[in-house]
Amino acid sequence: MWFYIVRRFNLFVLTVAVLYFLVFLMINAMPGELATNISGHVNPSVEQHEQLVQQYQLDKNWFNQYISFINQRIHGDFGLSFTTAQPIFDEMLKVLPATIELCFYALLVALCLGLPMGILGAVRYRKFSDHTVLGISLIGYSIPVFWLAMLAIMYFGLKLQWLPVAGRLNLLYQVDAITGFTFIDILLSDIENKRLALRDAFSHLLMPALTLALLPTTVVARIMRTAMLEELNANYIKASQARGLSPATIIFRHALPNAIQPVLAQVSLQLSTILTSAMVIEVIFSWPGIGNWLMDAIYQRDYPVISAGILVCAGFIILVSVLSDIFLIATTPQRRSAVYGSS
Amino acid sequence: MPLLDIRNLSIEFDSPHGRIKAVDRVNLSINPGEIRGLVGESGSGKSLVAKAIMGILNDRWYVSADRLRYNGVDLLSLSAKERRKLMGREIAMVFQEPSSSLDPNDTVGHQLHESLPMDECDVSFFKRRKWREERIKAFLHKVGIRDHKRVMKSYPHELSEGICQKVMIAMTIAYKPRLLIADEPTTVIEAGAQDQIFKLFKKLNQLNEVSILLITHDLEHVESWTKTITVMYCGQTVESGYTKQIFKQPYHPYTMALLQSMPHFNAQLSRKSQLTALSGSVPSLQHLPIGCRLGPRCPRAQKLCVEIPKMEKVRGHYFSCHFPLTEQEGKKS
Ligand SMILES: Nc1ncnc2c1ncn2[C@@H]1O[C@H](COP(=O)(O)OP(=O)(O)O)[C@@H](O)[C@H]1O
Ligand code: SF4
Ligand SMILES: [Mg+2]
């Protein structure tokens, strides 16, 4: 077990190192002064420039530059933003929770809908419900997220006026960002009508989260269906049927626990697609998250912000996939033994 | 009335080459208290027959039979729920691959717990746990597992195949079934413990009147533990009858070949001489010969053999062959 974790951790470190190297190359390739691009100081004074050269070892060879680049970034120094001249790290801390919140709820919806759909499809294999599940997931898979988002805005936002079309919370509510997560912040704040504020936050969240959830829901449903089908055909299921156990026991006590672990691990690999569509959704719904922030940065050619965004998003995805891998191993005795066997 | 009565059981599935009869009109019957052997090379469809009896083939398989009766009840017309009630309570099965027959994600102890019939439990709710533990311990001891504590705490992959098989057997006998289907129960068990399992079966058979369908490809086990046998080749029943009779005088060329592959069957066989065997190998399901499926390998095959031979009966001994071995020939070889 520990051996395995260490191995995964090595992989993590190596992948992140490669990621940093690519971003480092990118920064070098950007037009303009290297010291400016890497640190975000526009028009530094001579002393400042001197200091930056020191900091990033720009007078040494590329390897030293790379190492000190990693060093700066790991210690949370992502430089300044061109547009606001604020430390990028602080800005990121402001926008990151919004994205995490959006993705979290979307993933939650995806799991809550997708898992039962997948189970249903597998249990009623090739029956009407199965075809329905497959049909729905095919449709859901083919609908472009941005198109659905705009339709939703047009219909629920503008025509019916049920839901707000932009932002996270009505400006009426003066809630300080303590954690950055709206619901928690509202609960922590000392405003009056908290319940109204919560409702408002919820109505703001509803459309973006649901549209974002569509794609992962269909993916989860399909992965779950396949995994469950495989388990249902396994020998031990036949054996428990032969022992006369009830279908409910067989499905929920035996097949499901075996099927769901690989599914959860595979789903966390979907996080990269979720994050990508989250950026689109954020732009459409003016959700103040990292996607919106990055988009602005791209429009403004804010190179330090762009590179920081790439580092953080990609690093996050790598981290999650490593963690989910470890989670998978830790919870599946069968697999653990396979790992022992091979090592 | 036989306890299990199967007449012309066919099991088919759709392949890219059309529908294939993996099991072709098999006949099998077991009387109450009988131990019947079902023998045949691997791939001859023994496990399929067993699974069809249990009703656990998935919907890819099409099972049809003129008669598939257990204790007078037509199994094919039962609803899934009624059939489930019968399984486990009346008919139990020991599977061929024991370690994959246990849930890999669940402790052996819990799976044993789950399989205990609770309607026999007559103690109050709070004592149930203890009652179950006692029962499980007793069953595990019965099948020859001494360190029941460790076994119950283990996950299947932590145990050897042999132990897993013993656990499976313990589960099945916990129900006190009337019919026990044992699909190659001892192939994965070390030689010393094999006899122990067979003795247990024998004891169940004698004390509790359990009928047993013993599926195996090991003729020596069949010879020493069964009263009657059915021989299958390639999805067809070729011969059935009393074990003693068939061993003395097989009528079907395939049975003959099987018996001749047993070293001690030919007493006069000189040392280090070759055992006789049929030429060729078992045909794949995609290339089944028409008529008698043994045709291409059969030393006695003639033109007529492209038609499916009928079951014939001679003194309580059934065989399906157009050109059966006669008494002299049987003796001579
Ligand atoms: N799931 C399956 N899919 C396709 N063919 C199968 C499957 N299971 C068994 N078979 C085929 O059915 C035949 C009988 O198999 P089986 O009953 O397991 O034989 P036995 O138990 O006598 O060794 C074999 O030829 C095998 O290839
Ligand atoms: S029917 Fe013909 S081919 Fe089949 S076993 Fe008899 S002699 Fe051989
Ligand atoms: Mg078999």
Image (cartoon, rainbow, N blue to C red):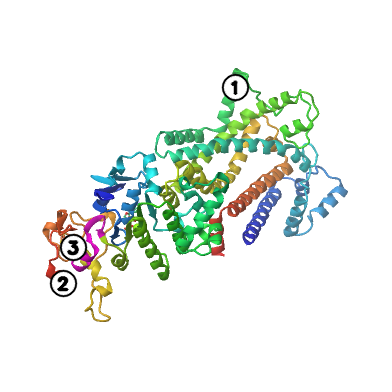
Q: Is residue B202 left or right of residue B330?
A: right
Q: Let me know if residue A68 is in the magenta part.
A: no
Q: Which mark is residue B252?
A: 3
Magenta span of residues: B229-253
Residue B85 falls in image quadrant: top left
Which circle, 3 or 1, is nearer the viewer? 3
Spatial CA span between label 3 and label 1: 78 Å
Provide the residue designation for mark 2. Answer: B331
Residue B65 seen: no
Q: Is residue B90 left or right of residue A35?
A: left
Name which residue type carries label 2. Lys
Spatial CA span between label 2 and label 1: 90 Å
Residue depicted at 39% across the width and 40% down the height: B81
Residue A149 falls in image quadrant: top right
Name which residue type carries label 3. His
Provide the residue designation for mark 1. Answer: A156
> Label 3 CB, ligand 2: below 8 Å?
yes
The vertical placement of B80 against A159, above or below, is below
Q: Chain of mark 2?
A: B
